[in-house]
Amino acid sequence: MSDSFKNLQESRKALNAMNSALQSKLDENTLKIFLALNQIFDIVIAVEKKQQDFKPEETTDIGEKGLTLFDNLVYELAAKQLNSEKLEVEQISLVLAQWVIDHGGVLTVLQTVVDGLARLSNSLKDKEDLTSLLHLITQIVHACSDPIKHDIDTSNMFRPWRILNINRGIVATRTHNLDIMNRVFPELIQAIPLDAPGFFKEGMSEMARLNYPAPVRHLMQEYYDRTVSPPVH
């Protein structure tokens, strides 16, 4: 998780600070999104303080509303070329996603969360940090709704479910941990079977370019052969 946003309170504070700083640059619609997100965080923080809990379906509903607001806010910030604020909002969305998961909810909205994970993974090099991030990505993969997991429309290469699983595979590879890779790769094949061959093909190119350790290269070769190479008759 980003060091800047470790909990709900800090996330709400960051959103409020951004809202205040951008008042003169934002239109009424964007300001309403900030207000609605603040209300979402008020609700979940109040639940935490009272040590009560929503029913799973209520948690899912709050998550869907909040993450949809994040998607809308990111769109508005990008349109106004407020790129640093956009990146910050993407990271904050991970806190809400984690809250939904921790409280038994299902994730039905992914775009901003997936973008936030991708940005975060690109900033990490330490193997322990990558392993911690992989744990979060795995939680998010498992918490996705059934319609997302069924991945019916495979025509869009940039769909969040595909990017989420590809990124999970990349982060697993970057840990250089064979046990982790052997856990993640079969799930990747199951989650995005039509895209998995391309992942392992690209992985083999990266193995050579970045000079990965031999055991990692050999394992990637095994999965490459399994999914890409034609069967021997």
Image (tube, rainbow, N blue to C red):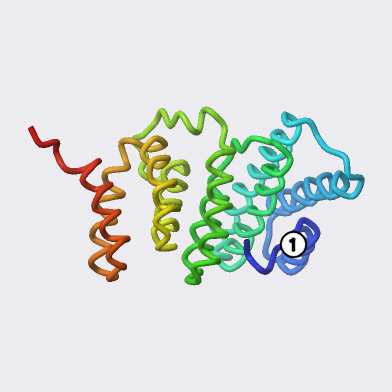
The residue wearing badge 1 is 19
The quadrant of the picture occupied by the C terminus is top left
Crowding near the residue tagged with mark 1, few <14, some 14–19, many ≥20 C-alpha atoms within 10 Å: some
Q: Is residue 222 left or right of residue 70?
A: left
Q: Which of 210/220 is in front?
A: 220
Report the residue that reaches farthest toward the left: 233
Q: Give the quadrant of the N terminus.
A: bottom right
Residue 75 visible in the picture: no
Image spot of residue 190 (x, y percent): 39, 35
Counting from the top left corner in percent of width and height, residue 149 is at: 48, 32
Q: Residue 55: x and y, percent?
A: 78, 30
Report the residue that reaches farthest toward the right. 50
Residue 88 in percent (x, y) is at 62, 64
The residue at 39%/56% (across/down) is 178
Q: Is residue 156 left or right of residue 27?
A: left
Along the line of sight, the residue nearer the viewer: 68 or 170: 170
Asked if residue 171 shows in the view, the reply is yes
Q: Is residue 68 above or below residue 205?
A: above
